[in-house]
Image: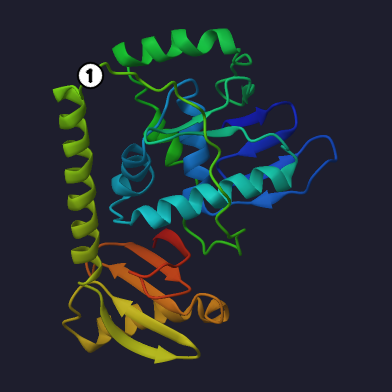
Amino acid sequence: MHNHYIINSKVEFRPAVSTLKPLDGHGSEVELNSPAARCLLLLIHKQGEIIGQQEFMDEVWGKNGIHVTSNTYYQNISILRKALKKAGIDDEIIVTIPRVGLTLASETQVVCEGRESKPPVSPAEHSARSEQSKESPDSNIQNSILEISSEKPQPTVIGGSPPLTEARIPRAHFNGCISPGILCLVAGVLFFWWTQHHTQKNYYSNYQFIYQGKGCKIYAYHLLKTQSFKNEVINWGMKFSSDCAIHPYIYIDKYEILPRVSVIRCDKEINKNNECISEYFVE
């Protein structure tokens, strides 16, 4: 039996089927898309720690061979926040630490049930767990994340981008001048932004338009050497034709010799201010 989690005694989270189910009658059951469910599972496994954007992108998408933009990451966190509220958790349990990352609110209680039952996590245990994780990282995180099924097309998800919850961090005060360390930090942040921006731009410029029909515009990442493989990619895109009125731009990354497909569906072109759903399938 797979693990499942009880959050604040209000909602049951089952990673294996990507569902949030209310336990007290307040709220309604929600089926998450696979990336949003993996984001929640990563937050649970690393409760008490701050998880950066790059770590989310590496664990949730990168280890499955999927390349996504930061926009996809923000969209899935937004989906997750709205889903938790719809399921009955009124408090904002996903806290944003500005320019650092995300963490579960310190008062959040999570009980693991199933094959590895764990007691509720108290706020006093957070700091101890954080120190322990530096010495012996949890090697089971990725295995647990991979338990989340992504072999079927996902249901319509909750969209939108609500404002991120900010936690205040005390400001540092300097007497007389800015230290060299601060200048180095600023330079590093600017360099990271520049490399991320240009890498993402170059990556998505590799997609080629291959087909338009039923309101869908399908793009393929790899050069399609044969007509049969092109038809196979088009058929994958047309599986989502019923949603093309909302997400008409379909970007497909499929290898001819590998049984896996990455599908990104957007309401606008990939490099514009858009809303996208990222999905990953194993054939």
Q: Amino acid at mark 1?
A: Gly
Q: Is residue 71 left or right of residue 103?
A: left
Badge 1: how crowded within 10 Å, few (<14), some, or many (20+)?
few
What percent of the width, then of the height, locates residue 53? 36, 41
Q: Position of residue 274 (x, y in %)?
A: 44, 67
Check the image and tell me how it is coloured. Answer: rainbow
Depth check: 43 or 139 in front? 43
Q: Quadrant of residue 12?
A: top right
Nearer-the-camera pick, 157 or 236: 157
Look at mark 1 in the image and give the residue it sits on: 176
- At horizontal 62% and vertical 30% (from top left) the residue drawn is 5
- What is the secondary structure assignment of the residue under circle 1? loop
User: Is 275 drawn above or below residue 267 in the view shown?
Assistant: above
Q: Position of residue 69 (x, y in %)?
A: 33, 56
Viewer-proximal residue among 70 and 168: 168
Image spot of residue 133 (x, y percent): 37, 16
Q: Quadrant of residue 189?
A: top left
Q: Residue at x 41, y 15 (%)?
A: 130
| Residue furthest right as drawn | 25
Q: Which residue appears at 25% of the width and 68% of the height? A: 204
- 74 up-or-down from 247: above or below: above
Residue 1 in sight in this render: no
